[in-house]
Amino acid sequence: MASLTESPAPGAAGSVDAARGRHYAREMGIVRKVVGVLALVLIGLTGAGPAALAVTPVDIVVEDRAGVLDRNTLLPAVQAIDFYQPTKVAVYTYNGSSSDNLNEEVLRFARSEHPEWISEDGQKWANGLFIFALDPVGRHVGTYMGEDRKVSPEQREDIQNAAKDLLRDAQWTDGTIAGIKGGAELINQPWYRSTAFLVTAWTAVAVAVAGLAARLIVRWRTRTTCRKELARGDASYSSVSMDLQVTELNASTIPDASRYGSTVLEKHRTFMAKYNTATGLANRVHALSPKDLSKRPNLRLVRSYADAAAELDALDDVIADTNALLNRGSAWAPAWDRQLAPFRADLAAIEQMLSRRHAEGDSATAAALRSFRDESHRDLEQWTAELAEGTITPETALDRLRDARTHLSELLKNHADTVIAGFAKNEKEAGLMRKDMESAQAGSKDKYGRTYEPSILGTVYPAYYFFSVPTFNAGFNTGVSSVGSARGGGGSTTGYGGSGGSFSGSGSSSSF
């Protein structure tokens, strides 16, 4: 058995944490002094203007009909945004087209689904309301306000522009948050918080403090990210260290005559070398002072440690599952379930993928995907039953799973061709979408940032071998964005179209 390497001493980590706390306190002291000086200067410049309220939204309504927002990220972020006056925030997304009038669509939706968004006379948006609307397919963004919350047309454009860089990069949730933050800053903004006034006031002090403030912000962000990555690495490293002997025992009984077993063993042969490398990285990052954690080069070091530890943590689980499944040990059933999990997730996501706008859900390739999904559910039950009865070997079961996932990959590629043909207007646009779909498959990552799948098949075959439904969706979203950018965007659109009637609520939309 390979020798074990000691992990960092807990006592040393505790003293480092204490030093980090003292360093953080010193930096916060500097920040408070800088803020104090700025406050005195600005009070002199503003003549002690009236205090502005800072109130979080009184209500948040999210109607994500496009299915592009992460509510777990969006809701806490919006709940923490300060407005100058109590404001109800509504978010509406839908999948339209480049020729749509988003203003007209938002009004139609409000009339049919949320009449409380409209004033009693039906001519304006309700008082106290701010609506942020997004069409990720048609590439439109819109902002709408009640009469007591409306801003100038130029400020509406500023709010929309605050979101566009993120939206162009298909970062729908972050773009929505940025847009709402932009609205909160401009809606009911006091005169002494206006851009024109602040430019004049800050010019007097900006030269003196800009450099220091920028450095403090960069250092604070770097230090915060370092700590998150350090915690991620420590969690994985601790798990690997505690299971090290068990991992070695599991590896020693994996049958090397198996094609799957031999490949996993090849990965294991470098396991201890990688573990020792991770240990060295752990010692280096835990020796960093609070000041060191504020430096960008050290962020790369900490992230390397976290990635190395996470890779080992995934691999020791795969080693355990390979041993349990191929030897039909007592834990073979949950090990087999873990191998099926990625495929089951793909099958479960097919219908939602096909129901999206421009997903060509009525096409022949869509029908083939649905038929394959139904057949595969039956196959999975049969394979599991045959494994339990011993009528097929674990290796045969893995072969069947590999073949099924390969077949799904081919069906998804065929459907990608259908979707591209339906959306693209010419060969140039088709080429853009095809490139984005291929790039998504080649460089897909899971929610932990890994480019590999922590399973037996994911260990034996490269990351790009299987085409998954999440990868298909990511490639399609990026492809649509690329085509939208190539088609170009227009300026601001006001008015609510032919169906708007006499409605004249404050609002507009624009392309991104």
Image (cartoon, rainbow, N blue to C red):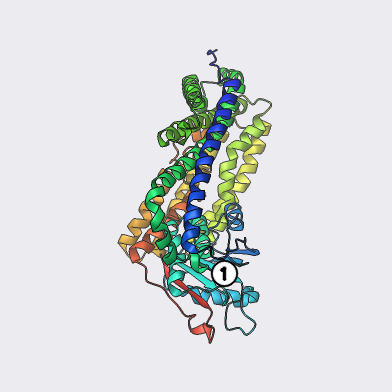
Relative to 501, does residue 284 appear above or below in the rendering?
A: above
Farthest residue in the bottom direction?
502
Query: Between residues 169 and 245, which one lies in front from this camera angle?
Result: 169
**Residue at the spot x=48%, y=33% of the render?**
293
Residue 167: horizontal and vertical position, in percent?
45, 59
Farthest residue in the left direction?
428
Q: Is residue 258 left or right of residue 165?
A: right
Residue marked by disc 1: 130
| Quadrant where the image shows the C terminus | bottom left
Query: Between residues 118 and 85, which one lies in front from this camera angle?
Result: 85
Query: Between residues 457 and 219, which one lies in front from this camera angle?
Result: 219
Report if residue 240 is visible in the image: no
Report if residue 33 is visible in the image: yes
Q: Is residue 267 left or right of residue 15?
A: left
Residue 175: horizontal and vertical position, in percent?
48, 58
Number of residues whose C-alpha sits closer than 10 Å to that of mark 1, classed few (under 14), some (14–19) or many (20 or more): many
Residue 46: horizontal and vertical position, in percent?
48, 63
Element under disc 1: strand
| Quadrant where the image shows the N terminus | top right
Say which amino acid is labelled 1. Answer: Phe
Residue 415: horizontal and vertical position, in percent?
45, 56
Relative to 62, does residue 232 appear above or below in the rendering?
A: above
Question: Total marks drawn?
Answer: 1
> Residue 386 is drawn in which quadrant?
top right
